[in-house]
Amino acid sequence: MPLESGADQPVRPGEQVSVSVGLQGAVDNGDRVFSGAFTADGRMRMNDPHVTAVMTISCTAAPRSYEVRIGSGGDPNPSEVTRLWGNVRVAPAEETERAACARRISELPPELREERWPADAEWPASPWDVRSVRAGGEMTATDGLGMGGDGGVTLASPVFTRPVVMHGAKRVSAVVRIRCDAKPGLYTVAWREKGRPSKVWARLRVAEAACPFSCVMVKRGRRALGIREGGTPEPGVRVPVFPATP
């Protein structure tokens, strides 16, 4: 049930409400949406062209009106400045309804954490910016926050053909190639920096190769020519040069 800005929305225990704001609004990905009527705070997640949060009305919420506010990302802070979005007005409920509410909430699926960013945004825009790529395909990973130094960060994933080192003067990036035999599914990308613990930095979703046989043959051909997965010849290997066709 959408909760519009400034609304006083009637709700019942166990119902879910959503808050959506356009990308040009004053709300950011990761901002917190909270109320005394919710079972837990919601988090704004990118769902192009909006950021959206979904919350559940608590089965034990007393029948009255509650403010719904939006705060910055991170944990609650007594000194943070929050924004009033609207109100939810919880209706009275009998004990039988509250008992059924508890069962219904326990059966709800886990929160969908995957985010859908604009296609022209650099990847990853956040750790849950899940983009799709076919087996055998390539993606460019860019450190948009400028956390890593040139040559100081290695990215690794079970679906990469090999770990890759990020390079760049101001912002580091790397091209990652997906294995031809990678199974469809969701995978994590690890950020490895010398002297620091490894962390999950990004996620991607692998789709089946458009032509698995062609993918494998291209891979074998690259190996035969002594070309690394990163796109450069192995040291000491002479790559044949073919004359141009007149």
Image (spheres, grey):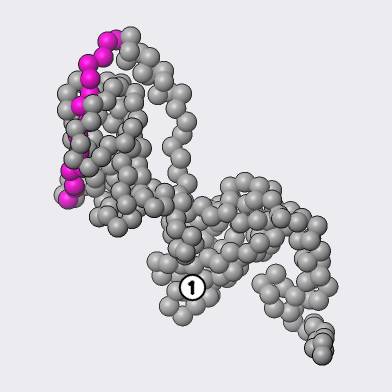
Q: Quadrant of the C terminus?
A: bottom right
Q: Is residue 41 above or below residue 44?
A: above
Query: Which residue sits at x=77%, y=55%?
Result: 212
Q: Quadrant of the N terminus?
A: top left
Q: Is residue 124 above or below residue 75?
A: below
Which residue sits at x=23%, y=20%? 91
Q: Is residue 57 magenta?
A: no
Q: Where residue 88 sits in the image (x, y, percent)?
A: 22, 31
Amino acid type at mark 1: Val
Q: Name the element at disc 1.
A: loop
Frontmost residue, 144 versus 189: 144
User: Which residue is situated farthest in the front direction here?
Assistant: 246
**Camera sees residue 63:** yes
Quarter location, residue 217: bottom right
* Residue 140 in the figure: left or right of residue 101: right
The 10 Å Cα crowd at callout 1, few under 14, some 14 to 19, many 20 or more, is: many
Task: Give coordinates of residue 215: x percent, y percent.
Answer: 76, 61
Side of 212 where 184 appears, left or right? left
Q: Which residues are magenta?
A: 81-95
Q: Nearer the viewer, residue 146 or 243?
A: 243
**Relative depth, front residue between 243 and 173:** 243
Residue placed under numbered mark 1 in the picture: 172
Q: Quadrant of residue 26?
A: bottom left
Residue 77, placed above or below residue 90: below
- Left or right of 198? Residue 159 is right
Q: Is residue 43 visible?
A: no
